[in-house]
Amino acid sequence: MEADAVTDISHNVIRLRSARDLTQEQAAVAAGLSLAGYRRIEAAEGEPRASTVLALARAFGVKPGELLRPAPPLPVARFRSTKRMRERDLLLMDVAKQLEGYVDLESLLGATSSFRPGDFATADVEPADRPIEAANRIRRAFGLADDEPIFDICGLLEDRGIKVLRLRVASDAFFGLSVANGRSGPAIAVNAWERISVERWIFTAAHELGHLVLHAADFNPAETTEQPEHERQADLFAAHFLMPQRSFAKEWEQTRGLELYDRVLKVKRIYRVSYLTVLHRLLELGMPNLWAMFKSEGKRRTGRSLLKADEPAALGPGAFLGPAVETRKSDEPTQLNEYDFLTDRRQRLVREAIERDIISIGRAAEILGVTLRAMRQIAGSWV
C-alpha cells in the first residue's frame, strides 16, 4: 500500500468518525481494535491490514472502497475563525466530501444549478454603500418584495443555485464558511451546533452570502485571519438582506407604543434575526444608549443579566426552514425548532436518484453521510 493510500485511509477514518460524532475509543470498540491501534490509523502511522480496513468499514457502515477513496481537493473557501481551530483541515475535507457527492448527484440527474456572485458587483457604488446596495440587488434578483421577510433562507439560497450545508462543530468560535464559485460552489456551510442560536445560523448564512458577493477575491483556504473591515461589511450586508431598510423602519415605527425590550423582541421575531441584529440596526440609525437600556430592561424582566449565548424569545432549531412566523405579541415566546433550518435540495436529489435507479442505497448513504441502516430508515419513511 502506497503512502498516499495510508494518508487517504487516515483522512477518511477521521472524517467518518467525526460525522458520526464518535470518540476514538468508541470507534475502536466498534471496529474491534485496540485504542492504540486505532490511533495509529488516524495518525497514518503504518499500513493497516486488509482485515482492519474491512473492520473499520463495517464499524462506519460503508464499503471498504470508501476508506480508500482519495480525499477530494480542498475547496476554494473563505474560512475564518475567532480562535485557532485544530480541526480546520478536517472541516474543509468534510465540506469538500459533501460537495463532491452533491455535484455528482446534480450531474447524474441533470439538475446543475448556478449562481454567479459577479453578477451583483457593486464597483459602480461608493465603497461605504456597497454592502447595502449589494443586499438590495440580491433581494430584487431573488424576487423578494421590499417589505418581505425571509422565512426559509435555506430554500431561498438553494433555489438560486447556492448549496447550503449544515455542520455540527462544538465551538462558538466558528459559525460558518463559504465556498467560491467553481465546480462545487458556490456553497455556504453553517455551524448548526445546538449551543449556537438558530438566529445565528440564519445570520451566518446571510453573512457568508455577503462574502460571496462582496469579497470574491478573498477566498483562500490557507488564510485564517479575520479581516475586520470585511467582516463588518458582511455583517452590514446580512442585516439589510434580512431586514430591508424601508420595511424595518415601518415595523419599528408600528411598535413605538411598546417598551424597548418588547419592541426589539417583536421585530426580531418578525425577521427571524437576533436581538443583537436589531440593536445594531438601531445604532446605525443613530439611536444612542440602546444597549444599556435593553440590558437594564431585560434584567428587570427576567431577574438576571443577559449572557453571551443568550437569545431572548429564541427561535428553535427549525427556524431555518419554517413557515411564516405569527407576529402577534402572544406568539413571540414560541420557539422555532431545527426544522426551520433544514437544507432539503440534496435530500430531494438523493430520493429522485434512488427512485430512478441511478444510485444505490449505499451510495445515497455515502452522499448524506449516514449509515446504511439510517439510509434505509430514511427511504422507508418517504411518502
Image (cartoon, helix red, strand yellow):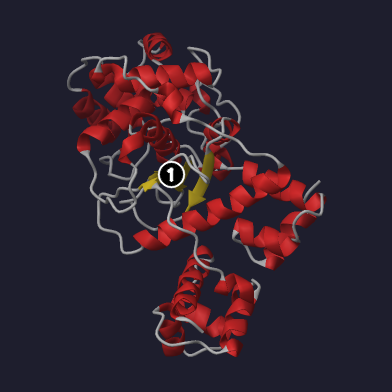
Q: Amino acid at mark 1?
A: Val
Rendered position, 55 above or below 277: below
Q: Nearer the viewer, residue 112 or 58?
A: 112
Q: Nearer the viewer, residue 317 or 214?
A: 214
Q: Nearer the viewer, residue 341 or 140?
A: 140
- Residue 336 visible, this orientation: no
Residue farthest to the front, as pictured: 2
> Crowdedness of circle 1 by 10 Å Cα count: few (<14), some, many (20+)?
many
Residue 16 percent location from the top left of the image:
53, 68
Identify the residue at image location x=30%, y=14%.
125
Residue 32 percent location from the top left of the image:
56, 88
Q: Nearer the viewer, residue 263 or 90?
A: 90
Q: In the picture provided, is 84 more to the left or to the right than 246?
A: left
Q: In the picture provided, is 344 more to the left or to the right than 123?
A: right
Identify the residue at image location x=35%, y=26%.
237
Rendered position, 324 above or below 73: above
Q: Which residue is mark 1?
A: 179
Residue 149 percent location from the top left of the image:
50, 21
- Residue 183 visible, this orientation: yes
